[in-house]
Image (cartoon, helix red, strand yellow):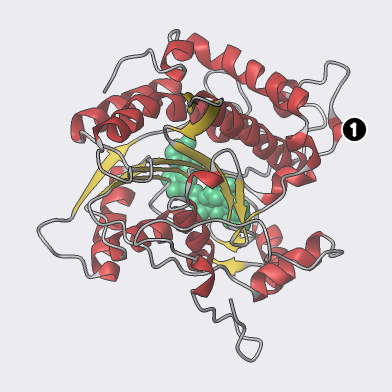
Amino acid sequence: MTDSNNSTTTTTTNNNNNNNNTITARETPGGPPPGLGTLGKLRWGAKHPPADPTVSFAGKTVLVTGANTGLGFEAAVKYARLGASRLILGVRSADKGEAAKQRIVQLSGRRDDDFFITVLLVDMAHFDSVRAFVQALGRATPRLDVALLNAGLANPSFQQSAAGWEMALQVNVLSTALMAVLLLPLLRATAAAETGTPPPTPPHLTFVNSFGHMLAEREWLGPSGSLLELANNREGWDPRKSYATVKLQGMAVMQAVARATTTTTTTSSAEQQQQQQQPEVIVNAVCPSQCKTDLGRQYGLMSKILMAPYQALFARTAEQGARSLVSATALGPESHGRFWHHDILHPIGDLAKDETLMRKAWDEIFQVVVVAQPDLQQILAGQGPQS
Ligand SMILES: NC(=O)c1ccc[n+]([C@@H]2O[C@H](COP(=O)([O-])OP(=O)(O)OC[C@H]3O[C@@H](n4cnc5c(N)ncnc54)[C@H](OP(=O)(O)O)[C@@H]3O)[C@@H](O)[C@H]2O)c1
């Protein structure tokens, strides 16, 4: 990656493609220099946008949720430009979805007969809508190579879903967890249908997370140590704590789904037995860094005015942020269960490294989602219905 005259132009040299459609991820070098605080890291991120991926998505079917605006929209444009055969836009309004579809065609210049865009409706505020969406997706496509779970929100005040959960918890965590698990049969079936030597890179399930998960503090937890309780507690709720908490829960979801999609094979030779772990589906999380998008749309005018200079100094454009989202969905198996940020497999926050806390957080999420989907465990374990 290079800077030219302090501008934000980058080259794509850090993609380290090992073939036409996989990016080999590394842990170092890269990322902000050590010793910077949060603002220093954000400023560094604004001045050093990630590499624009050049990998091919030819022949691939790609799902992007929240694809009508912001990072999801910019990612969808990139997939179209990078040759995807089919794009599925998961949006909550048909009008917005159709408008996005037209813009993607216009911006990508893709008018070939081999390219389709399908708009499917989903409102992640409701479990039923997520279930209906995945069923519709299964009818629309026999394969899914990439699922980019991007839809999310950041509210300025406490709002509740119909099921009684704080809205960011419902949308960013609970419904996203349900969607991730329900997509597994199709992703696994796509992997199983692939043959070839060497075997192709497995399909990708990528969660759009945030560096914000690193800002969650252990002191916020009550005596029960429950992240679910913390995220859902109206008393003392504040938007900054909420965002950090739901993104930390998002890391617990990603880790759990990554565990469930790791297979162990045993090979034996005359001398020894060896166990090898391989992902059936590559599951990872990504942070685009602070970006100029519609995420703050629910905030009042004064907050938006105050945010403007902050965004000017510390935020990437949505297009720059979307580079990370798209490259995350082209990483190799080394990214399974990991966090892609600033073009490296970035260290995760201390709380996300706390396995006891993360497993407890996942158990809590599971107990909620299983009520909406009683066979959740079977699907997770690969014993559910094949799409
Ligand atoms: N912007 C940043 O600085 C930043 C940094 C790190 C991570 N992220 C993450 O990036 C992701 C995308 O955010 P963004 O910044 O691009 O924000 P955005 O411009 O507000 O886009 C959010 C997308 O999510 C959709 N969405 C929200 N609630 C939904 C619901 N109930 N059902 C279905 N779709 C819903 C929105 O649809 P509508 O248009 O219909 O509302 C929109 O398409 C989020 O997960 C966010 O947490 C953002």
Instruction: State the image coordinates of residue 361 (x, y, percent, origin top left).
Output: 69, 23
Is disc 1 placed on a helix, strand or loop? helix
Q: How many marks?
A: 1
Q: Is residue 131 above or below residue 342?
A: above
Instruction: State the image coordinates of residue 246 (x, y, percent, origin top left).
Output: 66, 35
Q: Residue at x 32, y 34 (%)?
A: 191
Instruction: State the image coordinates of residue 119 (x, y, percent, origin top left).
Output: 26, 44
Q: On the image, numbered disc 1 is attached to which residue? A: 219
Q: Residue at x 52, y 59 (%)?
A: 324
Instruction: Specify the amino acid type for callout 1.
Output: Glu
Instruction: State the image coordinates of residue 111 (x, y, percent, origin top left).
Output: 15, 65
Q: Quadrant of the N terminus?
A: bottom right
Q: Residue at x 45, y 30 (%)?
A: 180
Q: Is residue 103 left or right of residue 166?
A: left
Q: Quadrant of residue 235?
A: top right
Residue 129 in view in this figure: no
Q: Is residue 137 left or right of residue 312?
A: left
The furthest residue to the front: 270
Label 1 neighbour load within 10 Å: few <14, some 14-19, many 20+ = few
- In this view of the protein, which residue sits in the foreground, 354 or 241? 354
